Image (tube, rainbow, N blue to C red):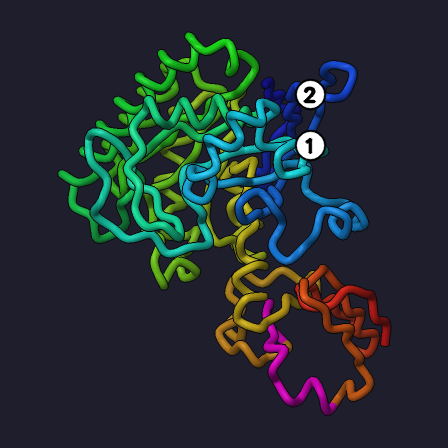
Amino acid sequence: MRFTLKSVTQCGCRLGTLSCQREVTNGENTHIIETPVCMLYTKKGSAPWLSIDMLKRIEKLPPIAHMHLSSLSDLSEAVEKFQQGIAKFTSMQDFLVYISVHDSGLEIPSGYNTKAGTAVWNKAGKKLVDPQLFIKCQEAFHPSFYQALSDADTDRKSGKKRAMKAVDRTLNFLDTILELHKKSQRLRDVGVFGSIEGGFYEEERKRSAKETAARDVDGFVIEGFHAQDEKNETFDVEEMKDLCKIVFENLPKGKPRLMHAVWSPDQVVMAMELGIDIFDSCYPWLVTERGGALVFSFDFDKTPQNEKDAGSSEGFEISLNDKRLFLVFPLVFCLVSNIKPFFVLLFHPFSRCVQAIGVDFVVSL
């Protein structure tokens, strides 16, 4: 894969292109993606509540499908026997595939990583993944690019000793993975992203950035700022702004930067201004799962106080269980089915676009 940085705007946003080889029926072709870009959030390789046929009907989808080792690890043997990679196995061959270690939308128990490997969690429970097993999985899945194994189990409360351990483990994992990656014929055209760790300690962040940049990686994953728990949505880009600037000063400008988080719309804008190129998109799924919908006025407010009120129509999120919506729009009929395809409601009186998952048609009022 190849990243080309075309320009940097006055606000700090990086504009570039990401070129990746993608297998097609008659061989391979080059897929070019403009950045900044978000990725399509998936569960076990499929968009939540969407069949592949329904997915194909939606225009302007993200070009990269974001999959997770934690949910796919149990499928590695089946995909290996399939021999055509995870993209075709899940009928997502129209997308580039990126595989991260964890699912940003789920809570991850803390304290289970070791120097031998990283603990991933799925419905079967905990599974310790070492570099050898990790590469075996990647050979079976054959993604477009993947995040190397890492120890991101740190947050603001983590001590310096824990931050140092996270950096050391991640670098050791990366060295082993890069060595195994180079020996693998199956992975010769697959990109590797190294992870930048170090918690909230400037020295460790610098060390992680410099050491990772010295390795032969195709891009960088910025993580380790927040634990993945029930407070996952409360993280604030402002808290990590200064550390991110220090990290980016020690990374080459010509390689992409990816960050996992629960990105609300205002946080995405601020992160782009910091210089992040690729984002995941688990936030809409989380909103949908609690019966909410996203509402955009396209007026950016860095501190939308009313976002805390899930029933408010003034923030980014409204509750679909709010009875006021039924009073204002009594004639909204929903087609109920066993799946929950994508839909958009256009509320003309308020000039708002509500996006959620729950019915399978477009209603204009």
Query: At numbered mark 2, what does the secondary structure look like: helix, strand or loop?
Result: strand
Q: Where residue 180 appears, x then y in whole percent?
A: 37, 13
Q: Which mark is residue 295?
A: none
Front residue of this view, candidates 201 and 158: 158
Query: Is disc 1 placed on a helix, strand or loop?
Result: loop
**Which residue: 35% across, 32% down?**
196
Residue lying at 76% horizontally and 52% vertically, measured from the top left: 54
Q: Which residues are magenta?
A: 314-327
Residue 141, horizontal then vertical, whole percent: 52, 28
Q: Would residue 181 be visible to someone looking at this image?
A: yes
Q: Are marks 1 and 2 in contact (CB under 8 Å)?
A: yes
Residue type of the residue flagged with mark 1: Gln
Quadrant that contains the N terminus = top right
Q: Nearer the viewer, residue 28 or 322?
A: 28
Say above or below: 300 vs 269: below
Spatial separation of the CA atoms under disc 1 and disc 2:
8 Å
Say whether residue 1 is magenta. no
- What label sits on residue 93 in the rendered view? 1
Q: Residue furthest left?
A: 161
Q: Is residue 69 visible?
A: no
Location of residue 3 in the rendering, given as x and y in whole percent from the top left corner: 60, 21
Quadrant of the drawing holding the C terminus: bottom right
Q: Of marks 1 and 2, which one's residue comes earlier in the chain?
A: 2
Q: Say which residue appears at 62% left-offset and 34% top-offset.
A: 89
Which residue is tagged 2?
Answer: 23
